[in-house]
Image: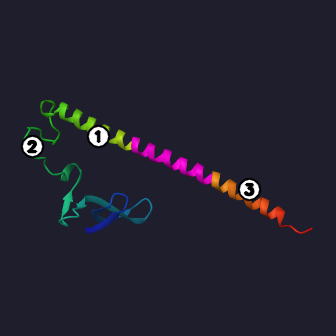
Amino acid sequence: MATVKHYDPRVNTTYVYDSKKVYDKTTNKTKLVRKLIGKIDPDTGEIVPTGRVGRPVKKQTANGSADGIPSEETIDYIAQFEAYRKDREIQNQRIERLERELQELKADYMKCMHDLRQIASISAGYLVQNQEP
């Protein structure tokens, strides 16, 4: 068996496979069979096992859950709600600021369009006066 590395740009990960050739009697050809070993950790460069067989054992966390997800007793809903309210308030302030800026830009645009129309009418009048018969 040979070890093959394959980079997947969609997830920015390099996977490691065991690869071997197997003869297929029905097609009378050899096929390449690959089995996933794991992926390469970008920080350490080591192979991290994946899949059911190679998946590392999850460690027990401080709150007593093995999967790293806090149990119902440890979730602080009040703190989450306050954080949500704070984020929402910041977003609302930003929206109000952007709306004010948009109104200012619209007013500037309207003034520029008015000035442009005046310039166009003056230049049209000037062209009519200076035409020779």
Estimate the spatial distance between the alpha carbons at disc 2 and disc 3, rounded to whole Å.
77 Å
Asked if the residue under mark 3 is in contact with the one under mark 2, i.e. CB atoms within 8 Å, the reply is: no
User: Which label lies toward us, 2 or 3?
Assistant: 3
- Residue type marked 3: Ser
Q: Nearer the viewer, mark 2 or mark 1?
A: 1
Of the image marks 1 and 3, the number of the one nearer the N terminus: 1
Residue 121 image label? 3
Which quadrant holds residue 14?
bottom left
Please rate how many residues cluster around mark 3, counting C-alpha atoms within 10 Å: few if below 14, some from 14 to 19, many from 20.
Answer: few
**Amino acid at the residue labelled 2:** Thr
Who comes first in sequence, dot 2 or dot 3? 2
Query: Image height check: is 100 above or below 28?
Result: above
Residue drawn at point x = 25 percent, y = 60 percent:
39
Q: Position of residue 86 (x, y in %)?
A: 26, 38
Q: Considering the numbered disc 3 on the image, is that residue within a helix, a strand or a loop?
A: helix
Horizontal side of 132 relative to 120 (left or right) equals right
| Residue nearest the observer in this picture, 19 or 27 | 19
Residue beneath label 1, please? 87
| Type of colouring | rainbow
Q: 125 or 15: nearer the eye?
A: 125
At 59% across and 49% down in the image, what residue appears?
110
Which quadrant holds residue 82? top left
Instruction: Choose the circle earlier in sequence order: 2 or 1.
Output: 2
- Specify start and end residues of the magenta stretch as a single range: 96-113
Q: 126 left or right of 87?
A: right
Name the element at disc 1.
helix
Residue 61: which numbered mark, if any? Answer: 2
Residue 108, label in figure: none
Label 1 is placed on what type of residue?
Answer: Asp
Q: Quadrant of the N terminus?
A: bottom left
Q: Nearer the viewer, residue 120 or 21?
A: 120
Real-space Cα separation, disc 2 to disc 1, in angstroms: 29 Å
